[in-house]
Amino acid sequence: MKHSHKIKIALSALPKKDWWGSGIVAYQDNDMMVDGATPKQTILENEYHQLVNMIKSAGLETTIVPFSDVLEKEEKFDFIFMRDHFLCNTDKKIVMCNMRLEERLNEGNFVVETIEKSGYIVNYLPNQDCLAEGGEFFYLPKENILLAGLCRNNLKGAESMAELMGVDQLHIIESSGYHLDTAICPIFNNEYDCIGINCAKEVFNNKNYNVLSHLSKTYNWELLDIENQDRKQSLVARSAMNCLTLPALLIGTSPINNKKVVDFANQYNIQMHVSNVSQFNLSGGSVHCLTNELF
């Protein structure tokens, strides 16, 4: 399927040396990271290039951000998860994020030069007390709405991000996932209207699930619960929520076999493609984490 919308997809280049070659160092709040695991580099490189090629085959341009030697020396290998560094709106305005974890501080500095050269206006959150990570947000461009989690974000960060992004509405959706993009995934039709939300119901308590349910009814989004068997069998399956989601297109690391989701996708001509990123899954990230939209 070729894309008619003018969207570029930003990705990090691979580092020159082995990615997490000395073994992954897991963060305490991310149970999807496999502490000490060493990714198989040949497989990882093949998976990366397959993902890039799939994005290009959908008619989308890519912007590749260099992986700095400084980051390699400091073993900040999770820089590769481009999603976390910034948000972009349809006015070509970039807002840089502030990471909660000390291990990932200042990674975004190595993104700025590339995106400024591409003609984007770079903005910053007011101060370091505003905690905001890209994986905690979903920007709905047609509705001009921002959805935000509060695991690695704080409220001040989410509100500041919404103000700088110029959205009409900010909606907080809390879950037990370390990032919101491990808990939900919006689905867009070909006109970029949000028409549905894939949801990992087990990461929500009743109160927060009811918030999501109420939002879905308010905006006429179909709420699609992904059953446990789609998430719990392996690291790959647990990343089922973490898709690159674009108009009439979902790219994820594993197939979603939930009949309700498949029927909904067929009804609205949503293409669902699989690009296995199993080696990146070892560090807790998947397709949505590896990518970021530039409007």
Image (cartoon, rainbow, N blue to C red):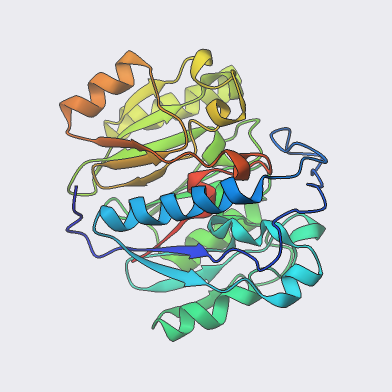
In this rendered view, identify the residue nearer to me: 113 or 221. Answer: 113
Percent position of residue 133, x then y: 61, 55
For residue 9, above or below residue 265: below
In this rendered view, identify the residue nearer to me: 294 or 89. Answer: 294
Residue depicted at 32% across the width and 22% down the height? 261
Quarter of the rendering containing residue 131: bottom right
Question: How many numbered circles does the render carry?
Answer: 0
Residue depicted at 57% across the width and 45% down the height? 43
Viewport quadrant of the C terminus: bottom left
Position of residue 59 in the picture relative to residue 149 (left or right) = left
Percent position of residue 215, x then y: 39, 32
Percent position of residue 84, x then y: 58, 57
Percent position of residue 26, x then y: 80, 43
Residue depicted at 49% across the width and 59% down the height? 162
Q: Residue furthest front?
A: 42
Quarter of the rendering containing residue 127: bottom right
Residue depicted at 52% across the width and 72% down the height? 65
Quarter of the rendering containing residue 234: top right
Position of residue 264 in the picture relative to residue 232 (left or right) = left
Position of residue 22 in the picture relative to residue 215 (left or right) = right
